[in-house]
Image (cartoon, helix red, strand yellow):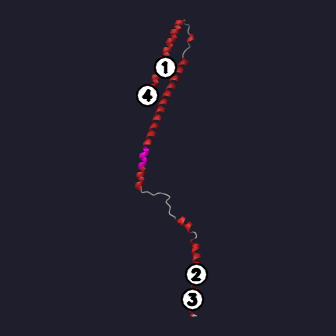
Amino acid sequence: MSYLNGLEQCVDSLQTSIDTLSSSIVALDSGIHDFPRIKQVLKVQRHFHLISEQQLQERRQKFDESVKPYLLQAFQKLEDSITALQRQEDSLRTKYELQEARLDMLKNRPPISALPLNSDTTDQLKTTIAKRQKLLYTLERYDLQLRQKRGY
């Protein structure tokens, strides 16, 4: 019987070990069932690529070298356009001033019909007045251009 006693003790010991292992498995299972989520949370991800200061300076320099010519060209076009618009504005101002001066001259001129003249004298007078107006207009234009060049 001692043989059966020994075997019975082994079976009891084995049953106790199985129960202990089962409770350990249950305990471990409750502790590790969340491992996929924890693995995802603890997973190391690089959201930003870190580079050294020297690499940063090199990349900035390459960027500047590639973009700077385009920017300079665009700024030059912009300056040329501004200069052209300023010249156009000056030209229009000069034209306006000349037209205004001419209009003032025409308003202050006495009418031709007030003078009693014959047809030959009238034609000659009209031609002379037209020449005079043309010369005055040219003179005023040159005068305004000269003042504009001097900055007055």
Q: Is residue 35 above or below residue 6?
A: above
Q: Is residue 76 above or below residue 137?
A: below
- x and y percentages locating residue 118 in the rendered image: 54, 5
- x and y percentages locating residue 52 in the rendered image: 42, 57
The amino acid pointed to by label 3 is Leu
Q: Is residue 147 above or below residue 23?
A: above
From the image, tell me which residue sits under label 4. Answer: 149
Label 2 residue SS = helix
Q: Residue at position x 43%, y 44% from top?
A: 68
First in residue order: circle 1 vs circle 2: 2
The amino acid pointed to by label 2 is Ile
Q: CA distance from mark 4 to mark 1?
A: 18 Å
Q: Which mark is residue 18?
A: 2
Magenta residues (range): 61-68
Q: Nearer the viewer, residue 128 or 6?
A: 6
- The local crowd at label 2, few if under 14, some if 14 to 19, many if 20 or more residues have their Cα within 10 Å, is few
Marks 3,1: beta carbons within 8 A: no
From the image, tell me which residue sits under label 3. Answer: 7
- x and y percentages locating residue 120 in the rendered image: 52, 6
First in residue order: circle 4 vs circle 2: 2
First in residue order: circle 4 vs circle 1: 1
The amino acid pointed to by label 1 is Tyr
First in residue order: circle 3 vs circle 4: 3
Q: Residue at position x 45%, y 23% from top?
A: 143
Q: Residue at position x 57%, y 78% from top?
A: 24
